[in-house]
């Protein structure tokens, strides 16, 4: 019998259409425009449906990736939606901000040939297709009978939303307590509109609510009620998904000058307080013509690109290591460079300089060189003596990372925390040392990715469900 020839590998991964850099640098519309239907079909047909399916284990929430891609190939979009939603309550978010290049796509079999399947772009396509064709899909999810068990989830960021959605699918009654006036946590206040539109986040929040999850806004837990009070008030388990919203600073001279923001404050004013919709929203935010953003992560890229869109002429990224060590996604660095952000690499602030009115006017910096690797595995930056120079600026944004807010730990008896302020919890289950309390996401790990927080929320939900069933 004649052997069938093996299908030829298609290594021509489809690029995502994007706005022109010169145009997008002055608007807050989404940069990536998404695949068309024809493009999604063509990219899905590159998947070889390999038997080992390494992409599934590479995904923190274990989406059945080959299965939903096959559904796209079969032109069965409702089935692709069903498969995605089986494991992921937030596909529209993940398809936009999840670093697939270091997770599912990194272990894709085709990556060995240099061109992995564009899994994230296909996930985004299906999520967007669902939103546009909602009238053609079932109006309400198929849920199991209620168990009568009540669970409190504190925080409505990616960890809290994922944990709540899975617990609702297990049949439990879930209430999310959110400190802010809108749900979504860092997805709403931290990630700009041009990268993650607010309407997308609200759509995913609405889906979680459709599962029967109640969301109570303006509820600052630790003030309104403590974790112990919740446990006494009929909640049989509590999940802490409060994130890491406390900014870190440089601790250098001049950091308290007017015009020096933490990235948290700056991005909250831009996103949550809607400075990006000026003049419809006249948010109090100062930009000026020259802005320096200190840091090299995704948050630094977000702040720099926001400053450019708000009217700055020159925006500098000041980063103490080289491009190689920069923790931001390659895609975000590339977007920033295309838009005209100026990268001052191997540079570290020494002090901020101000005028007589108390406003920042410049930042004095050191040139740096790289020595031996430090605990992070990256080469340690070392000051070049006598290399000081000054950059004139009107505004500075410090984007060095965040730590958890101490409010919940300080009001919860028996909750163990580390010196960094993060909550101690089991990596596999999210269980803390305090009885009936679980935790996951940035409150446990420190600032990390959206998808890692979702994975933690999913594992905690499974552990809570197991506990409630045994109880």
Image (spheres, helix red, strand yellow):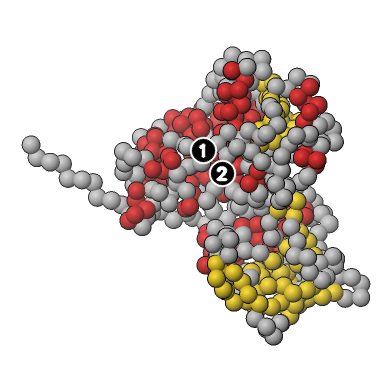
Front one among 218 and 468: 468
The residue located at (75%, 77%) in the rendering is 364
Q: Dot 1, crowdedness within 10 Å: few (<14), some or many (≥20)?
A: many
Front one among 213 and 275: 213
Pick whichever of labels 1 and 2 is earlier in the sequence.
1
Q: Which mark is residue 451?
A: 2
In the rendered image, the vertical position of residue 92 relative to residue 32, given as above or below: above
The residue located at (57%, 19%) in the rendering is 143
Q: Locate residue 308, reporting x and y percent.
A: 68, 65
Residue 122 visible? The answer is no
Q: Which mark is residue 366?
A: none
CA gap, disc 1 to disc 2?
8 Å
Left or right of 379: which side holds 235? right
Element type at mark 1: loop
Answer with the quarter of the image where residue 41 lies.
Answer: top left
Residue pushed farthest bottom? 386
Q: Circles 1 and 2: CB distance less than 8 Å?
A: yes
Residue at the spot of label 1: 61
The residue located at (66%, 77%) in the rendering is 383
Answer with the quarter of the image where residue 215 lies.
Answer: top right
Front one among 293 and 241: 241
Task: Locate the N terminus and report the quarter of the image it occupies.
Answer: top left
Residue 366 visible? The answer is yes
Q: Locate residue 144, reporting x and y percent.
A: 56, 17
Left or right of 296: which side holds 267? right
Element type at mark 2: helix
Report the label total: 2
Residue pushed farthest left? 1
Task: Locate the C terminus and report the quarter of the image it occupies.
Answer: top right
The residue located at (52%, 27%) in the rendering is 137
């Amino acid at each position: 019998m004649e052997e069938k020839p093996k299908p030829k590998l298609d290594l021509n991964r489809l690029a995502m259409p994007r706005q022109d850099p010169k145009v997008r640098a002055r608007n807050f519309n989404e940069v990536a425009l998404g695949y068309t239907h024809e493009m999604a079909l063509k990219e899905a047909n590159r998947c070889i449906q390999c038997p080992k399916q390494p992409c599934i284990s590479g995904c923190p929430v274990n989406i059945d990736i080959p299965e939903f891609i096959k559904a796209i190939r079969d032109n069965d979009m409702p089935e692709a939606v069903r498969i995605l939603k089986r494991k992921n309550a937030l596909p529209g978010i993940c398809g936009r901000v999840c670093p697939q290049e270091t997770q599912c796509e990194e272990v894709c079999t085709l990556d060995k040939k240099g061109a992995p399947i564009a899994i994230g772009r296909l996930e985004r396509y299906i999520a967007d297709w669902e939103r546009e064709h909602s009238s053609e899909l079932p109006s309400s999810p198929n849920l199991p009978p209620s168990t009568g068990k009540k669970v409190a989830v504190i925080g409505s960021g990616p960890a809290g939303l994922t944990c709540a959605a899975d617990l609702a699918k297990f049949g439990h009654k879930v209430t999310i307590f959110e400190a802010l006036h809108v749900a979504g946590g860092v997805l709403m206040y931290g990630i700009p509109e041009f990268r993650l539109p607010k309407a997308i986040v609200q759509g995913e929040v609405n889906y979680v609510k459709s599962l029967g999850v109640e969301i109570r806004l303006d509820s600052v837990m630790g003030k309104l009620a403590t974790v112990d009070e919740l446990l006494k008030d009929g909640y049989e388990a509590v999940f802490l998904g409060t994130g890491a919203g406390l900014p870190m600073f440089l601790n250098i001279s001049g950091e308290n000058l007017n015009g020096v923001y933490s990235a948290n404050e700056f991005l909250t004013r831009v996103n949550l307080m809607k400075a990006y919709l000026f003049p419809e929203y006249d948010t109090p935010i100062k930009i000026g013509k020259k802005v320096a953003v200190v840091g090299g992560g995704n948050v630094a890229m977000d702040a720099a690109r926001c400053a450019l869109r708000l009217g700055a002429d020159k925006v500098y990224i000041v980063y103490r290591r080289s491009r190689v060590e920069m923790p931001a996604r390659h895609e975000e660095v590339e977007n920033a460079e295309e838009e005209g952000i100026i990268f001052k690499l191997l540079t570290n602030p020494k002090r901020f300089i101000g005028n007589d009115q108390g406003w920042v006017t410049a930042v004095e910096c050191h040139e740096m060189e790289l020595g031996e690797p430090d605990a992070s595995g990256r080469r340690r930056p070392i000051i070049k003596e006598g290399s000081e120079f000054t950059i004139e600026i009107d505004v500075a944004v410090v984007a060095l990372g965040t730590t958890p807010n101490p409010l919940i730990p300080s009001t919860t008896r028996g909750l163990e925390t580390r010196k960094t302020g993060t909550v101690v919890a089991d990596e596999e289950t999210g269980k803390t040392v305090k009885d009936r309390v679980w935790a996951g996401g940035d409150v446990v790990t420190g600032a990390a990715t959206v998808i890692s927080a979702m994975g933690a929320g999913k594992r905690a939900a499974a552990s809570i469900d197991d506990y409630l069933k045994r109880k």
